[in-house]
């Protein structure tokens, strides 16, 4: 039986209140600012009331964003999102800062430090005050408006194949075709289509860099990288730790990626391994088809989660029943995929661009892991407690990709196809880590050198990309496509510096999977226990709750990669 979830009863904001204009919201901020707090109990109620208000506003923004990405061609959706970004969000920022300062000045605050989560919350309040600058409000409005353009530009990209108009995501499926000539034609079409907008996207990125650097300087930071480390609340690691991660990946993972590419070249029997040879099955088999359409993907995804744990299946079933799944790719839909937490009702929304591939299946496993995380934190006292560090958020999703493999027979009934799917997943894990290092190192360089030229960017992009790429793939004649390969990575445009988390979380996911392989019951219990903590503990403490280490040293990475290789060897 599917649980019916309704919005929790409001205690502070009227039940019939909807976010429409700033004028309708402002009285609640004023009341919180002017309210007298004369006891620990009243302080807790103040935090709860503020959390309720912020959850309502957050969910309203969430739906505006979801609708805009579902249909980028709908002017009303775009206008609605833009209205929030330009006319509501900028006015919230100064009042949120005033509330943060008020909270830190209330004498009863220290008494809350013993309550779970409040120490982290107070640490974050201090951080927000440290980086807040009123003159950055207008800059953030400009930044948010510009990032919206990336989704519109990318969402409009299509190519024609066999007289059919396809999104780039749909066309990319053909790169798994066993017909090499057809793969090359489609690869070149996709590349040429991206390159049509290279100047527009380059100019957009230049503008974003300029705006972001100004934000950092306004807040007294040397560069935007240092600003974002503080803004993201990265209290548990530093840029130097990221550089160690990059080096560890270069030493321990890239040589394995090279071996995989060399084997692929040999098995395909080609003189030169080309970029359009990377997705096809190296044995010459037809691409794995994991499902038939969005409905089938949904039903099978629910079944996999249910076999892992009935509660996990219930989470996806509830989202499906509530219409919180939009999985299939179509024209006018923004690229990528996400799980958007809806703060008030506590039931998230999954957005995807699925076609029929195995990668689409694992994307649902990934986003489903995020969704489960939202459900597990749903009953925490405050909204701040429900918003985990990104390193933990991605641990939830990437670990789900791996532990769900035990039940992939739901998607692949044939034993050989199931084994093949698992091999592809583990090889993808190995190949993803160098790409994460590439994007992260590139971002460090970009914002450490904010006045660089486009030519500088191309030069350093290639230096970094080559450091983490296999030396087998031949890019001759495709130099321009390689120069602008970074433009497909939406994180660079929309969520800068949100990428190293995937690497740290991938290591944690491997460790959780290793623990799960030894004892499924304990491994799953540790996974759920860690996620239930939300944002009430430090990152190392949350990893420890899962029974794993928060560590990205070369020694630890070597240990985890050796485990992945042993599992690959067992699969044959």
Image (cartoon, helix red, strand yellow):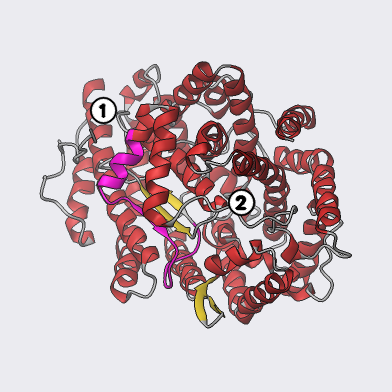
- What residue is rendered at 84% in x and 56% in y? 265
Residue bearing the label numbered 1: 43
Q: Position of residue 459 (x, y in %)?
A: 80, 67
Mark 1 or mark 2, which is nearer the start of the sequence? 1
Q: Quadrant of the N terminus?
A: top left
Residue 13 visible to the viewer: yes
- The magenta region covers 314-336
Report the residue that reaches farthest toward the front. 414
Magenta stretch: residue 326 in it? yes
Q: Where 494 sits versus 97, above or below? A: below
Q: Position of residue 305 (x, y in %)?
A: 42, 34
- What residue is rendered at 61% in x and 18% in y? 518
Query: Which one is nearer the viewer's eye here, 298 or 113?
Result: 298
Using the image, tell me which numbered label, if any, was put on residue 221. 2
Using the image, tell me which numbered label, if any, was put on residue 395. none
Say whether marks 2 and 1 touch (CB < 8 Å).
no
Residue 453 visible to the viewer: no
Q: Mark 2, residues whose alpha carbon is within 10 Å: few (<14), some, or many (≥20)? A: some
């Amino acid at each position: 039986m599917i649980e019916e979830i309704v919005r929790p009863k409001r205690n502070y904001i009227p039940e019939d209140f909807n976010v429409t204009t700033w004028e309708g919201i402002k009285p609640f901020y004023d009341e919180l600012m002017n309210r007298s707090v004369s006891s620990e109990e009243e302080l807790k109620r103040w935090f709860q009331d503020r959390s309720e208000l912020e959850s309502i506003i957050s969910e309203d923004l969430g739906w505006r964003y979801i609708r805009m990405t579902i249909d980028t061609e709908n002017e009303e959706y775009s206008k609605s999102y833009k209205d929030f970004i330009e006319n509501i969000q900028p006015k919230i920022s100064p009042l949120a800062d005033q509330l943060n300062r008020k909270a830190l000045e209330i004498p009863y605050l220290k008494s809350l430090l013993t309550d779970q989560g409040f120490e982290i919350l107070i640490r974050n309040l201090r951080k927000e005050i440290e980086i807040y600058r009123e003159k950055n409000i207008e800059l953030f409005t400009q930044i948010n408006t510009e990032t919206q353009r990336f989704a519109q530009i990318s969402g409009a990209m299509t190519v024609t194949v066999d007289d059919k108009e396809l999104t780039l995501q749909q066309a990319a499926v053909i790169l798994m075709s066993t017909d090499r000539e057809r793969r090359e034609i489609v690869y070149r079409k996709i590349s040429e289509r991206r390159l049509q907008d290279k100047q527009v996207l380059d100019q957009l990125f230049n503008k974003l860099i300029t705006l972001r650097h100004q934000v950092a300087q306004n807040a007294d930071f040397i560069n935007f990288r240092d600003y974002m480390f503080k803004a993201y609340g990265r209290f548990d690691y530093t840029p130097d730790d990221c550089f160690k991660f990059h080096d560890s990946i270069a030493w321990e993972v890239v040589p394995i990626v090279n071996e995989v590419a060399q084997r692929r070249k040999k098995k395909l029997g080609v003189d030169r391994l080309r970029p359009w040879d990377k997705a096809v099955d190296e044995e010459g088999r037809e691409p794995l088809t994991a499902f038939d359409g969005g409905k089938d993907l949904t039903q099978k995804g629910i079944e996999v989660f249910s076999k892992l744990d009935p509660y996990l299946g219930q989470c996806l079933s509830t989202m499906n029943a509530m219409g919180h799944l939009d999985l299939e790719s179509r024209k006018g839909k923004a690229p990528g995929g996400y799980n958007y937490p809806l703060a008030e009702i506590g039931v998230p929304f999954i957005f995807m661009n699925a076609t029929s591939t195995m990668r689409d299946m694992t994307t649902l496993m990934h986003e489903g892991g995020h969704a489960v995380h939202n459900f597990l934190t749903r009953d925490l006292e405050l909204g701040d407690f429900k918003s985990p560090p990104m390193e933990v958020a991605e641990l939830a999703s990437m670990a789900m990709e791996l532990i769900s493999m035990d039940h992939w027979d739901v998607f692949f009934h044939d034993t050989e196809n199931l084994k093949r799917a698992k091999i592809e997943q583990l090889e993808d894990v190995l190949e993803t880590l160098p790409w994460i290092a590439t994007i992260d190192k590139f971002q460090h360089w970009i914002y450490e050198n904010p006045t660089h030229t486009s030519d500088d960017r191309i030069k350093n992009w290639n230096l970094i990309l080559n450091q983490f790429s296999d030396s087998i793939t031949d890019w001759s004649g495709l130099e321009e496509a390689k120069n602008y390969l970074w433009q497909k990575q939406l994180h660079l445009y929309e969520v800068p510096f949100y990428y190293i988390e995937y690497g740290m979380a991938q290591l944690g996911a491997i460790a959780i999977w290793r623990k799960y392989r030894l004892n499924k019951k304990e491994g799953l219990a540790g996974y759920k226990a860690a996620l239930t903590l939300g944002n009430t503990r430090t990152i190392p403490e949350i990893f420890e709750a899962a029974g794993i280490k928060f560590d990205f040293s070369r020694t630890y990475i070597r240990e985890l990669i050796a485990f992945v290789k042993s599992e690959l060897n067992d699969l044959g």
